[in-house]
Image (cartoon, rainbow, N blue to C red):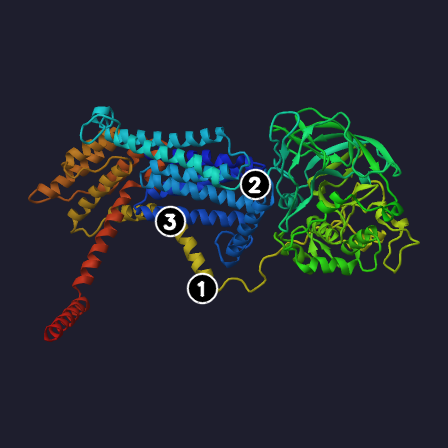
């Protein structure tokens, strides 16, 4: 492999090494194999284009066109012209994929699924960086600056990873860059011999020190290292799970510290929109009724008008027996149940999913207990990765009567959990009062709010709705009436607070789906948020305002004797206590059907496949232009082969009998170009006999082919030096015999290059340059140009005369 071939391979390997830093971001990693194949094809186009007599910018353009055609064929084959050319429909399809990919990047947690949009972004990004690196390092022969695009590719991966890309990926990327520099160094040494072989001769001035290319590489390397350290620090990162690693204890001690967490709205929406319902955990429980087996992760009790989030709380060591839930009276029946839980190895976040309220937790590792929210949070990097633990919890079963007759909560609790910001839109408070008009107790108001969201208000469940933020998010949701569990729970909790009912939001998982082996599986699509309202004597109590999600608890159905109006639900139609083993209800399933049991057809329906634009297709001019562009791109690599075949045929075709000298010189020119194609560069300073001997020696010609070369050289000498040249026949056959001899002695790669990318095609570039210079000279000396110059000169002279008179 020659120096340029090593550079080409080094540029490709360096790009793939830097792109490998993106492997932890998505799952599976099959996209990298597709990107490798695509990059190899684009790199191959560049290698072929560099063998042609093309200008450097045209080589880059050819690679870019090849990349566009490749991406079109892979990602928009159905909309492309002839499955390859990027017409208007294909451009629109690719633009939609890019838009979806950008949306998916912000939607999914790491590792994100490789959706078509994300795959397009990954592969096109690797192709773009690979094209830039190949252009800098190979086409323009400057490998050192190629480290900057490689650094950009690595920095994107480092910035998006929750814990950075990892030092090993930096080592891999750096090794790829060093390999590229090594390939360039070997190429330079092969061209310049020992000029840069020693420190004493490395600098142009002969002074000591490192050679110029090495010093330049050091400077760029130092700059790259600096950027690699700074860029990841300022780039945003994606979450790492339902909530991501958001909790952190303030100290390793056993008696203090605080925890805090970010708003989980976006992360929860990510989980609900995952295309594959990956199992987060599974459990086995002694509970007979698993409808209440909501696995709670964290309670969001602080509402600042922009978001719901947990307050900063003091954490302690996990006690052997957790304290009794606040506000729970001994009059309320409870059942103790035991649950064994096992989390997936990929699921790693700091908050521990627990049935509420937990009474005892047997778990390995470093965990801390937050009493107010009754949650467990990992300490010093502890997370839920591949965890097995036991939980003893209480199933609290209050009656509607107990909730309706609950006394007022403690003043401090009432004051803390009914706070709403002054910036809360007035529509939230007015809607809450309108919906609960006529309700006498806090319990009646809570049930009316729940039923208005889930049944009577005309709301639609949709996880694709933009989550939004700020004080207007709830008002917009109340007006548009479309959202997912976060919107419903956040809005009901805020409205309950405006009515004086202590409220907060819990985030976790619904009970999951029963399995044949007796366990229950909880997946990403079971991620959920629900409001918890406080009733003295019962404590924090779950409600379910989200239509088609979860289950409404029995106590949230008022007594039939107290229900009024046709919309009151029947207790006899409460949801089944056993989790469904079939598909979950579709989000479009009516809330009324879910609540009354009248929706047997409510099941997940496959989404209708989207189709491309239905208009009349591309315009004729666009189709013609696209076909012409594709033909030009496809024909570009064949130009040297076609040109060389035509020139050879013309030279060896012969001519009029009286033009023997021209036939001899044409045969000689073909002999020299044939040697050039096989790597024997023509030397115009040599005599014909010496030039023929050089071709025989370097090409290692056999005796018959060598004799043919000598006959052609002798004929040329006769034409050039003899007073009366004697015509010689059979020169075309002699040239073909020399060509066959060179081909027989050449290795396979050289034979292929001599045919597909002949070196003598450089004459075509020289011919085009000469014609362009002649054309420019002709235009400059033409009559219209001369007349124009004379007119301009006359105008300038007239202007000067007017200036002198003034």
Work out which quarter of the rendered image holds the C terminus and state it: bottom left
Front position in the image: 142 or 691 = 142
Q: Quadrant of residue 690?
A: top left
C-alpha span from label 1 to label 2: 45 Å
Q: Using the rendered image of the protein, determine whether residue 633 is visible from the camera's viewpoint.
A: yes
Residue, far front: 411
Residue 490 in the image: state x and y as whole percent.
70, 49
Indicate which disc, 1 or 2, sits on the residue closer to the N terminus.
2
Q: Are marks 3 and 1 in contact (CB under 8 Å)?
A: no
Front position in the image: 210 or 2 = 210
State the residue position of label 3: 61
C-alpha span from label 3 to label 2: 35 Å
Work out which quarter of the rendered image holds the N terminus and state it: top left
C-alpha span from label 3 to label 1: 22 Å
Judged by depth in the image, the label closer to the viewer, 3 or 1, is: 3
What residue is at 51 percent from the left and 49 percent from the top? Answer: 73
Crowdedness of circle 3 by 10 Å Cα count: few (<14), some, many (20+)? some
Indicate which disc, 3 or 1, sits on the residue closer to the N terminus.
3
State the residue position of label 1: 621
State the residue position of label 2: 238
What residue is at 89 percent from the left and 52 percent from the top? Answer: 570
Q: Using the rendered image of the protein, determine whether residue 701 is visible from the camera's viewpoint.
A: no
Element type at mark 2? loop
């Amino acid at each position: 492999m020659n120096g340029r071939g090593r550079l080409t391979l080094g540029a490709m390997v360096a790009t793939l090494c830097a792109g490998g830093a993106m492997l932890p971001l998505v799952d599976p990693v099959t996209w990298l194999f597709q990107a490798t194949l695509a990059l190899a094809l684009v790199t191959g186009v560049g290698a072929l284009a560099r063998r042609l007599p093309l200008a450097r910018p045209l080589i880059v353009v050819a690679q870019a066109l090849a990349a566009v055609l490749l991406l079109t064929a892979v990602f928009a084959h159905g909309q492309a012209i002839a499955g390859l050319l990027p017409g208007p429909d294909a451009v629109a399809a690719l633009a939609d994929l890019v838009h979806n990919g950008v949306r998916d990047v912000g939607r999914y947690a790491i590792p994100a699924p490789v959706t078509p949009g994300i795959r397009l972004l990954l592969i096109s990004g690797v192709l773009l960086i690979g094209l830039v690196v190949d252009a800098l390092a190979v086409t323009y022969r400057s490998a050192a600056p190629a480290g900057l695009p490689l650094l950009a590719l690595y920095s994107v991966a480092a910035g998006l990873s929750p814990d950075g890309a990892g030092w090993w990926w930096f080592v891999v990327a750096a090794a790829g860059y060093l390999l590229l520099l090594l390939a360039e160094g070997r190429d330079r040494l092969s061209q310049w011999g020992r000029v840069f072989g020693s420190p004493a001769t490395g600098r142009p001035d002969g002074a000591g020190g490192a050679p110029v290319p090495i010093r330049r590489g050091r400077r760029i390397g130092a700059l790259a290292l600096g950027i690699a350290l700074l860029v990841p620090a300022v780039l945003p990162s994606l979450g790492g799970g339902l909530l991501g690693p958001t909790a952190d204890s303030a100290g390793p001690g056993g008696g203090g510290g605080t925890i805090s967490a970010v708003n989980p709205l976006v992360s929860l929406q990510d989980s609900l929109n995952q295309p594959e319902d990956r199992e987060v955990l599974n459990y086995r429980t002694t509970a007979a009724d698993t409808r209440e087996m909501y696995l709670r992760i964290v309670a969001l009790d602080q509402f600042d008008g922009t978001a719901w989030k947990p307050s900063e709380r003091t954490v302690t060591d996990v006690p052997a027996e957790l304290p009794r839930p606040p506000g729970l009276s001994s009059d309320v029946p409870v059942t103790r149940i035991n649950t064994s839980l096992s989390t997936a190895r990929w699921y790693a976040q700091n908050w521990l999913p627990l049935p509420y309220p937990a009474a005892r937790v047997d778990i390995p590792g470093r965990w801390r207990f937050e009493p107010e929210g009754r949650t467990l949070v990992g300490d010093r990097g502890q997370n839920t990765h591949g965890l097995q633990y036991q939980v003893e919890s209480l199933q609290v079963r209050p009656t509607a009567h107990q909730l309706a007759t609950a006394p007022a909560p403690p003043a401090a609790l009432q004051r803390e959990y009914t706070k709403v910001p002054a910036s809360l839109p007035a529509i939230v408070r007015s809607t809450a009062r309108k919906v609960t008009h006529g309700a006498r107790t806090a319990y009646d108001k809570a049930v009316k709010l729940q039923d208005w969201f889930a049944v009577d208000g005309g709301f639609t469940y949709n996880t694709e709705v933009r989550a939004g933020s700020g004080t207007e998010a709830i008002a917009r949701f109340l007006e548009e009436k479309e959202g997912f569990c976060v919107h419903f729970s956040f809005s009901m909790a805020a409205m309950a607070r405006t009515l004086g009912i202590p409220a907060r939001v819990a985030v976790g998982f619904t009970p999951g789906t029963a399995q044949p082996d007796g366990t229950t599986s909880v997946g990403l699509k079971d991620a959920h948020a629900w409001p918890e309202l406080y009733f003295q004597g019962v404590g924090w109590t779950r409600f379910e305002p989200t239509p088609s999600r979860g289950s409404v608890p029995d106590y949230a159905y008022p007594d039939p004797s107290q229900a009024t109006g046709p919309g009151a639900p029947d207790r006899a139609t409460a949801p089944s206590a056993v989790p469904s083993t079939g598909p979950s209800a579709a989000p479009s399933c009516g809330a009324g059907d879910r609540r009354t049991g009248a929706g047997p057809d409510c099941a997940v329906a496959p989404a209708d496949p989207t189709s491309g634009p239905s208009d009349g297709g591309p315009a004729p001019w666009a189709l013609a232009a696209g076909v012409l562009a594709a033909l030009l791109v496809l024909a570009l690599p064949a130009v040297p082969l076609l040109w060389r075949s035509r020139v050879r045929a013309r030279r060896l075709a012969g001519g009029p009998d009286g033009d023997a000298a021209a036939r001899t010189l044409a045969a000689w020119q073909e002999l020299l170009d044939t040697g050039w194609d096989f790597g024997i560069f023509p030397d115009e300073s040599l005599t014909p006999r010496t030039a023929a001997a050089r071709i025989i020696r370097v090409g290692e010609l056999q005796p018959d082919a060598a004799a043919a070369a000598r006959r052609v050289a002798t004929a040329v000498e006769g034409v050039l030096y003899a007073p009366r040249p004697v015509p010689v026949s059979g020169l075309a056959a002699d040239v073909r015999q020399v060509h066959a001899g060179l081909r027989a002695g050449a290795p396979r790669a050289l034979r292929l290059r001599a045919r597909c990318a002949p070196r003598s095609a450089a004459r075509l570039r020289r011919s085009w340059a000469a014609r362009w210079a002649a054309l420019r000279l002709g235009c400059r000396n033409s009559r219209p140009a001369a007349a124009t110059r004379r007119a301009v000169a006359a105008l300038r002279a007239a202007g000067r005369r007017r200036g002198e008179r003034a």
